[in-house]
Amino acid sequence: VGIDQEVALSFVPSLGSAQDTDILKMWILPGVLYTCETFDLSAVADTNIILYNQDQQPFSPWIGNADRAPGDPSSEVQYLSTYKGWLYVMIGPENIPTYEESPQHTYSARCTATLSTSTPTPTATFIPSSGGGTISTPVPSATPVEVSTQVPTPTPIDLSFLTPVVPTRPIIDIQPLPTSTPSSSGGQTLTVNVTLYYDANNSFTPELTEGIMDTAVALYDNATGQLVAFGYTNEAGMAQFSNIETGGAIRVDVPFLNYSQVVLASNSEILIRVAPQPLPIGIP
């Protein structure tokens, strides 16, 4: 999201998820005061904001806000940046709604920037006058500097060597489950289960006969880019990774489907649905 850009969001979870959490990613510069807020909340919405640093770890001390003021369910946080890089803004519901009521929980969000500079104290210059007195001439204040908000384009990673090239690419419907707020401790153990399935009956639920087998799944340390685990899906389309030791978030990549997701929770279930496609009427 860019500076001063307003986005309209809701707490409607993906299929198979119990809760929806929205994450905004913003490029920041040092010495700038950033303010992120939610507004235009629906009558039943209640938001909560938590900030994460470029390593996707919570700040110390913790930076977050649930209610902007007593009786106001919107949220507002401020951060005086000390580094140049990415800032992650996690927005979640204060009270998790049911799936049926979730479309009513809507809100808008934005982040603004203010250059934090010290204002010099003006000094008076005294010029002798003809009458023997003095004339006080104040020094004009400094002109503020505009903050640049240009975001660099990240360099993509080529993982085509992991799987053979296919002539056509299927339509996929990704159904990640929500991630919870990670612990502030230095290390953690993750368990990640990935299921790939071809939804032949359009039930939006993986079945044992619908698994996509022998598909490569790679896990990387999201901070360093180091490969921490690798495997292939079984006949049920499942790839299970247990007791993954990491100091932060993990990025799950499925190169065959060009799919990538960052995992923050200690236990994560990822469902990747491949939608069925009609066959052509005839072969030319």
Image (cartoon, rainbow, N blue to C red):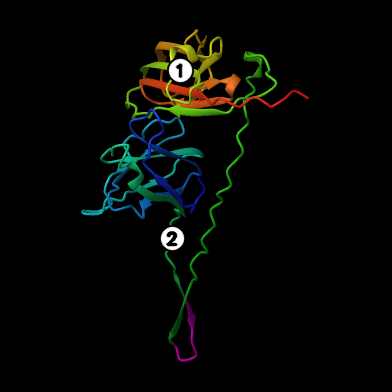
Residue 73 x/y as whole percent: 27, 50
**Residue at 48% in and 67% down:** 141
Residue 155 x/y as whole percent: 63, 31
**Tag count:** 2
Residue 120 x/y as whole percent: 44, 61
Query: Disc 1 marks which residue?
Result: 194
- Residue interval drawn in magenta: 126-132
- Kindly identify which numbered label has been placed on residue 113: none
Is 199 drawn above or below residue 144 in the view shown? Answer: above
In space, the residues marked 2 and 1 are separated at their CA atoms by: 54 Å
- Kindly identify which numbered label has been placed on residue 119: 2
Q: Is residue 6 shown left or right of residue 160?
A: left
Neighbourhood count class around disc 2 (C-alpha, 10 Å): few under 14, some 14–19, many 20 upward: few
Q: Disc 2 or 1, which lies upstream in sequence?
A: 2
* Residue type indicated by callout 2: Thr
Say if the magenta span includes residue 37.
no
Residue in front for this viewpoint, 104 or 136: 104
In what quadrant of the picture does the C terminus appear?
top right
* Foreground label between 2 and 1: 1
**Residue at 28% in and 46% down:** 46
Most distant residue in the top direction: 235
Most distant residue in the front direction: 281
